[in-house]
Amino acid sequence: MYAITHISVFDGSTIVADQAILIDRDTISAVMPMSQAKSRHLLPPECLDGTGLLATAGFIDIQLNGCGGVLLNTDIAKSTLDTMNATNLRYGTTQYLPTFITSEAEPLNEVIQLMESIDAPESEGVLGLHLEGPFINRQKKGAHQEKCIRELDEETAQYLVSHAHCIKVITLAPESCDQAVINQLTEANIIVSMGHTNGRYTDYTAKQGISMATHLFNAMSPLDSREPGAVGYIFDYKPHAGIIVDGIHVNYASVRIAHQLLGEKLFMVTDAVTPAGTDLKEYDMAGTRAYVTDGKCHYADGTIAGAAVTMIEGVQNLINHVGVSKEEALRMASLYPAKALGLDAHYGRVRAGYKANLALLTADLQVKGAVQMGVRHNL
């Protein structure tokens, strides 16, 4: 057991000063005022001074393709996940869903086998796999390879269900999938997220089991006066929805409007790829050469190909450009994604009984260090 002392704590609701956080293995055992911890002689022998820092729940990135110079689609290996996790921790992210975009069947099988080979993925920040495709609409393929897009048939759905213990989210185009296969996924507790979709509003209302939306506004049919499309459905039915807050994928005013409509159902993702957390200007985007220009990740033809933003940069953008409060920005990066995944009983707050996942921030919202499942990093 150890304690972080004299630290401000954002517990998911409010910020309280001069606290002690007691950590026992991978769990927060107590959070209390320093005066109480001292008077009751509850501080363990090992204490870390957190004076001047703010402890918030570690960020949870539900859509992370790569970072730190690596991309899961181009290198399906444990070393790739290790690099992604190490990079995440530098920027306050303690949990994530490694995201694998549209591919042929063999690489898809390979990444599932990789996930199953990890003994204790939670200890390394992995909450499960996010399969973004290949069961999407070609008209909204974005940076995905069109030749790899295919139908989700019952046999494939059953294969995915047989590996549901390591698959957390599947992004698909509902208009391209039968209700029967969606049912197979949801009955296995796989979260079905609508994305890379070009359906009409009625295509979505006719389907059951859609509980999430992937990168709101991007690669989906827009809200129009006579056809509400995917965006209109999301605003109306309010599934949990991820949004990229880099100022490139979505105008900050659109983020603000979405937040006003969706509230705690809106969470932040990075959709980050290879250059995030690096100074790279060129990279391999799953077999296609891509570039970074003024923070925009793109192909030679200008098509957006992922993002270079980190979660802490997204938090800063939410506060400085979208205009949400510090507390709400932190919730959008931690508590709200935990709720979207159904994990908010153990993740997303700094409270007794929750997993010990913390981002320690300076007054100007720079990441000073992190705690992942009780293990200290850069502290």
Image (cartoon, rainbow, N blue to C red):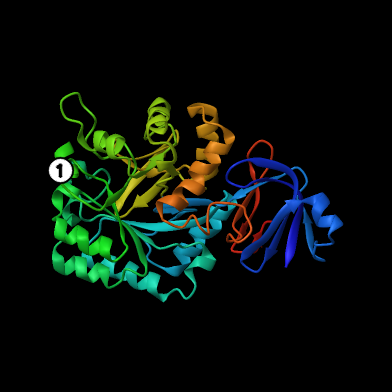
> Does dot 1 land on a helix, a strand or a loop?
helix
Residue 258 in sight here: yes
Where, quadrant-wise, is the C terminus in this rendering?
Answer: bottom right
- Number of residue marks: 1
Where, quadrant-wise, is the N terminus in this rendering?
Answer: bottom right
Q: Position of residue 157 (x, y in %)?
A: 20, 65
333 vs 105: above or below: above
Q: Residues within 10 Å of mark 1 (few under 14, many from 20)?
A: some
Task: Give whichever of 278, 157 is nearer the camera.
Answer: 157
Task: Give whichever of 27, 46 is nearer the camera.
Answer: 27
| Amino acid type, residue under disc 1 in the picture | Asp
Indicate the quadrant where residue 269 lies: top left
Q: Position of residue 328 (x, y in %)?
A: 53, 37
Q: Residue at x 37, y 31 (%)?
A: 261
Q: Residue at x 45, y 49 (%)?
A: 337
23 vs 287: above or below: below
Task: Give whichever of 353, 171 is nearer the camera.
Answer: 353
Q: Position of residue 147 (x, y in %)?
A: 16, 54
Indicate the quadrant where residue 204 lies: top left
Q: Position of residue 44 (x, y in %)?
A: 80, 65
In the picture provided, is 250 more to the left or to the right than 138?
A: right
216 vs 371: above or below: above
Q: Residue at x 33, y 69 (%)?
A: 112
Residue 310 in sight here: no
Residue placed under numbered mark 1 in the picture: 203
